[in-house]
Image: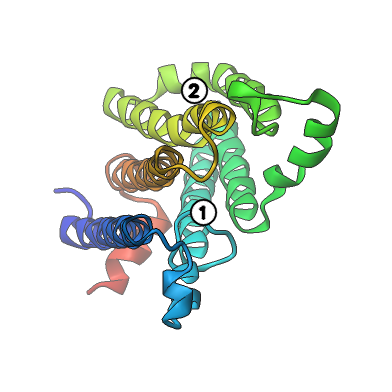
Amino acid sequence: MSLLPSSRKGLLVALASVIAIAAIAHMAATLVEFASGDPDIFTRYHFGEIRREFDLESESNVTTWFSSAMLLVCALLLSAIGRARRRAGDALAGYWLLLAVVFLLASIDETAMLHEATMRPLAARLHPSGVFFYAWVVLGLPLAIILGIVNLRFLQRLPRRTRLEFIVAGALYLGGALGLEMVEGVIATKIGAGSFTMFAARWLEEVMEMCGVLLFMAALLRYIAEELPHEPLVQDYRRGLR
């Protein structure tokens, strides 16, 4: 029997519900702004701050914290798996710990906006346009490729289902974070950053990123339950829900 399926599924359903509500609310609010022709309509009716706090495209708000927290939880789960595998003498334990560091940095970046700090100096030197209009992609794309190559052996050694879940989750997340960011660069260059097309692309980007992280978290929780049933982490989890 799998580890506390109702509790694990309950957590994932709750997180998925938050993502769905945030995505629908953001879409509805933006449609109101476009339909009214007034981008400040919520501010005029004294709902501007509430709108900003739950805006998927804004930084340093509630939705940013939520995304950052999910990335941090993944980092903690990866670290726990890595330490368990190292105790078992697994030669691939270092890969789990490497991913833990990557997700920790991603969590920090989500709130500190580190990647955006590179945009101005890169843009000043490269004068990018089109797919590289958002200049941080010039660094992000090769880093993602290198990380994929480094972890190729690790992926091949994972259980088949876990490997597939990791690939799907990674494709969703990177497809949003990098793929759609590049599409948005083309839209910004040819149509403009204030267009509804740009809004739709940015909305989809944020939703894909959050869904990718959620799927990855689900894969980690299932892996822990099925592959590490006797680890202290799992035993403590079981006792805590008795």
On the question of residue 89 being in view, the answer is: no
Nearest to the observer: residue 85 or residue 129: 129
Q: Position of residue 57 (x, y in %)?
A: 49, 54
Work out whether 101 lies above or below 29.
above
Label 1 Cα crowd, 10 Å radius (few <14 / some 14-19 / many 20+): some
* 28 lies left or right of 191: left
Residue at which label 1 appears: 76
What is the CA distance from the residue labelled 1 to the residue labelled 2? Answer: 19 Å
- Three-letter amino acid code of the residue under disc 1: Leu
On the question of residue 203 being in view, the answer is: yes
Q: Secondary structure at mark 2?
A: helix
Q: Residue at x 49, y 68 (%)?
A: 52
Q: Position of residue 199 (x, y in %)?
A: 43, 45
* 106 lies left or right of 180: right
Q: Residue at x 59, y 46 (%)?
A: 106
Q: Position of residue 134 (x, y in %)?
A: 65, 34
Work out whether 44 lies above or below 79.
below
Residue at which label 2 appears: 154
- Three-letter amino acid code of the residue under disc 2: Phe
Q: Secondary structure at mark 1?
A: helix
